[in-house]
């Protein structure tokens, strides 16, 4: 019946990864000095965290700064691509087969549609300073029941996109987002190096 909510739906906790991302987006405005890459505190109201959320280990303003910067840079890029009818997705939570199936489906969308898909790099491709952070993230994701299952090289992702039907596909390194949105900052805030993007157009 319309307007009714089941007990299961009421009791279902929000995805912990989605909540963490929402809190990082809000935290960027609260703890990082301007200019802000993304001005979003609505996420905080949507996540409805408890009063002590800023004391969570994964909210440490210094230890998570690279992840926080990567999240807001990715969100800003998606906003900048909205006029190009961007679809978006992440790959670390699904198998390569599921990623390929998703790419094939999106490749069949209307001509001119743009896909922005993030993917985690294989460990050896990360900057040495970011590897401990990735290991900690993997451990946390595993404990939360949302393990990272896929890691890629840029060449692998481009090959997968072309095999799935995209003629126009390019790799966007995470470092390019740093140059695009964080250039000139004096506080040292920069995205971590573990996540790159695939941009593909139908």
Image: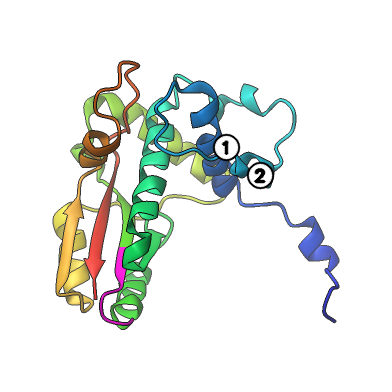
At x 49% / y 30%, what residue is drawn?
28
Position of the C terminus by quadrant: bottom left
The residue at which mark 2 appears reads as 47
Proximity of marks 2 and 1: CB atoms separated by less than 8 Å: yes
Q: How is the image coloured?
A: rainbow
- What secondary structure predominates along the stretch shown in magenta? loop
Q: Is residue 92 above or below residue 48?
A: below
Q: Is residue 150 above or below residue 110?
A: above
Left/right placement of residue 56 relative to residue 91 reads right
Q: Is residue 95 visible?
A: no
Left/right placement of residue 9 relative to residue 121 reads right
The disc label shown at residue 23, or none:
1
Horizontal and vertical percent position of residue 68: 44, 33
Which numbered disc, 2 or 1, marks the residue that appears first in the sequence? 1
Q: Is residue 67 above or below residue 102?
A: above
Q: Is residue 50 visible?
A: yes
Element type at marker 2? helix
The disc label shown at residue 106, or none:
none
At x 36% / y 73%, what residue is drawn?
102
Q: Residues within 10 Å of mark 2 (few under 14, many from 20)?
A: some
Q: Of residues 119 and 80, which is closer to you in this image?
A: 80
Q: Is residue 52 above or below residue 39?
A: above
Horizontal and vertical percent position of residue 60: 52, 22
Q: Of residues 181 and 100, which is closer to you in this image?
A: 181
Horizontal and vertical percent position of residue 76: 38, 46
Q: Is residue 54 magenta?
A: no
Q: Residues within 10 Å of mark 1 (few under 14, many from 20)?
A: many
At x 33% / y 58%, what residue is drawn?
81
Horizontal and vertical percent position of residue 135: 38, 34
Residue 10 quadrant: bottom right
Q: Which residues are magenta?
A: 109-115
């Amino acid at each position: 019946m319309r307007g009714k909510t089941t007990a299961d739906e009421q009791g279902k906790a929000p995805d912990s990864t989605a909540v963490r991302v929402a809190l990082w987006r809000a935290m960027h405005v609260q703890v990082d000095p301007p200019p802000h890459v993304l001005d979003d505190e609505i996420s905080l109201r949507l996540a409805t965290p408890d009063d002590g959320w800023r004391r969570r280990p994964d909210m440490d303003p210094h230890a998570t700064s690279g992840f926080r910067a990567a999240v807001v840079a990715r969100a800003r890029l998606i906003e900048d691509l909205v006029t190009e009818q961007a679809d978006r997705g992440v790959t670390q939570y699904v198998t390569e087969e599921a990623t390929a199936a998703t790419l094939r489906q999106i490749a069949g969308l209307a001509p001119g549609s743009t896909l922005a898909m993030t993917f985690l790099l294989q460990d050896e491709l990360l900057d040495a300073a970011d590897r401990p952070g990735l290991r900690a993230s993997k451990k946390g994701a595993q404990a939360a029941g949302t393990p990272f299952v896929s890691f890629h090289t840029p060449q692998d992702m481009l090959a997968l996109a072309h095999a799935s039907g995209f003629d126009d596909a390019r790799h966007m390194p995470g470092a390019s987002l740093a140059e695009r949105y964080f250039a000139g900052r004096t506080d040292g805030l920069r995205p971590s190096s573990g996540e790159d993007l695939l941009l593909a157009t139908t």
